[in-house]
Amino acid sequence: MSKRLALLISALSLASVGVQAQETKTEEPVDFHVSGQAVYTKVKASGESFSPSLFQLKADIEFNFDNLRGIGLQGMVGMPMSDDKANGMTLELTQQSGIYVTLTDPDTKPDDLKVSILLGYASTEIETSLPSLTTGQNKDTFSDFSYGFTLQDQIVAGEPFYWTLDVLRYYKDDDLRVDGLGLGVTYAF
Amino acid sequence: MRSKGAALSRGAAYSLTLLLVAGVLGLTGCGGGDNGDSARVAQTVDASKTGVVSVALEDNQGSIHVSGNLQFNLIGTDKDGKQSNLNDKTTWTLSDPRLGDIKNGLFTAAGQVGTFTLTASYAGLTDSQLVTLTDADLIGITVEHASGAVDVCLNTQFTAKALFKDGKYYNYPLTWSLVDPASRELASFADETKPELATKKSGAVKVVAKGKNNAGEVITSPEYILNIDPSIVALVLTSDKSTEMNQGQTATATATAEYRSGAKAPITANASLRSSNETVMTVNPATGLITAVAGTRLGTEVNLTANCDSTPAVLPLKIFKPEIRTMEIIGETGVLTSTETIQVRVGGDVDPRIKVNYAGTGFDPEVYTGEDVKWRFTEDSNSYDADKITIDGSSGLIKVDASLVLTVNQILTVEARITKLNGEDTEVGSDGNELKDTIKLTIRP
């Protein structure tokens, strides 16, 4: 599944390069955005929840031409802002990255509330530390299909800044679940 | 969303996006990265709650028969020395997975001889041991029981020790049976591969366990005689719902035995539950699930009975129809479709029916069979020949005497109404209207 996703992303990247080549001929076939946001995460394991926070930097391109209108490509990297503790155990998300295909209603106007679905692949590095155990710190990276949605709305009419609210599932298996709620600002080029 | 006057050039933004995407692809390993140990994360969280600081595999004989199994136990110890079993939270791994399968510490051999290292991991703490799989031949079986006796109608567990040619005992697949018909009258093994005996009557039963050796010969244990004590002093039947049930409802009955020792125990599956009328109510004797099959508006009485070693119990139940929503008069035959009129010829008779619709879902309309119905002609008895055109006030049967002289059709109006229980007033349906209907009767010459 993840390899197929990588192939899809590669195809979209190639398509976007083609679009760049045509950029001088057609009228702005792609939109660009960058975002910075604070993310409140919820990591659930063995009936306990931890809420370390992240700062995420995101950039995306959104296609404006016929067949790919409403489709975009987004990359994300996350850095730790704070860890969380419970029962003497510390849990921190030390690194995160993700790549998504974004799906947006192509008829959304610049001043509309923009709702996008994100489907992609995310990788989250988790560091756990329980001093009572002799095993010390452990660091694991969890990668899987990731999905969610994002809402964007203009902060001031006519200005290129937007509030952004993300709700995403980064990872889930039988033992562990990582979700995130992000709030930040997006700049549209 | 687009800014016409962006400070950063679109080319630079495009490059930035592609760079970030490429970087992310690299970070995520193009979707092919190895996943971390999420079980260890969960175990570490668990250890933070339980306080476990060390783990160790519980002592065992370290060898297993290739046809058998063995339960391993990983014991966690906290800083105060308190121990707990961690089997269902542990990650169990075999150095050679071809030799068997392990889940929650229960190893089941795959039939091959060999050795493997079993490793049990919890929150990064591990313990391991070498395990040998043997195909030693079965030479004897001994049946054991904790006390040699059991209160009647209780289930009881046996154990068996299977002795092998290497002088060791292993867990081994055995079958369990009762030796003679007299024993089988008193008790039974529901699953012959499991050593759980269900008892129903008091007396002594003879139990054996059997297994096959490597040559396929059946090795049988000596007979073990178990006494089933006639110790029951009372049996009580209860339902988890009201004893007044609506048709279609289910409930669970429980039979509870009281013994001479004062102990009480649920014995539902061994208490021979029965319904006194299976057209009204059914019961699953194994689970105690009772189903109200068919009731009446006044309620149909039915008994649920139980019996353990000649000690009976009875639970009287009453099965009702659900509340009637509407009613209408229909013809005497055919499907339950509405009709505008009913007809009868001079010298004939007609017996109209009442169709009722019930409140709630899941109940089909049906012909009403209750006796609390009043029938009549709405016309004054002087307006027709009441001696020759009659209607039975209870059944609704209409008769037209052959001596009635008619030259044209005569039309009368028939009314039926369902009365309140123990009363003459008309009952009100669940939709708020009286349960009453009229229909035209055409009497043809």
Image (cartoon, coloured by chain):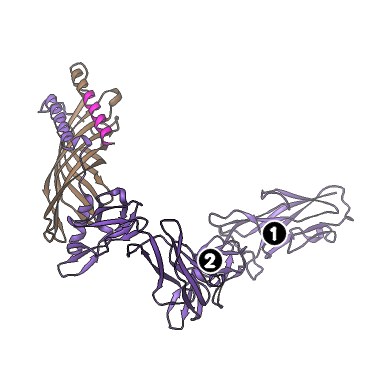
Tell me if residue A125 comes above or below residue A103 in the rendering.
below
Which chain is home to disc 1?
B
Report whether B68 appears left or right of B153.
Answer: left
What SS does tag 2 mark? loop
Which chain is home to disc 2?
B
- Magenta span dominant secondary structure: helix
For mark 2, what is the residue?
Answer: B285
Report the residue that reaches farthest toward the top.
Answer: A25
Evaluate if marks 1 and 2 touch, with contact meaning CB atoms under 8 Å apart. Answer: no
Please rate how many residues cluster around mark 2, counting C-alpha atoms within 10 Å: few if below 14, some from 14 to 19, many from 20. some
Q: Is residue A115 visible?
A: no
State which quarter of the image contains the C terminus of chain A: top left
**What residue appears at the point 13 percent right and 27 percent down from the top-left corner?**
B15
For mark 1, what is the residue?
Answer: B416
Quarter of the image holding residue B175?
Answer: bottom left
Please rate how many residues cluster around mark 1, counting C-alpha atoms within 10 Å: few if below 14, some from 14 to 19, many from 20. many
**What residue appears at the point 16 percent right and 42 percent down from the top-left corner?**
A96
Q: Which residues are magenta?
A: A1-15
What SS does tag 1 mark? strand
Q: Point out the frontmost of discs 1 and 2.
A: 2
Report the residue that reaches farthest toward the left.
Answer: B7
Task: Report the front residue among B15 and B168.
Answer: B168
Q: What is the x, y in percent for residue B441?
A: 76, 52
Identify residue type, mark 2.
Answer: Pro
Earlier residue among tags 1 and 2: 2
Tell me if residue A161 comes above or below residue B46 in the rendering.
above
Q: Which chain is purple?
A: B
Check the rendered structure and report the hue given to chain A: brown
Q: What is the x, y in percent for residue A151?
A: 24, 40
Q: Is residue A67 magenta?
A: no
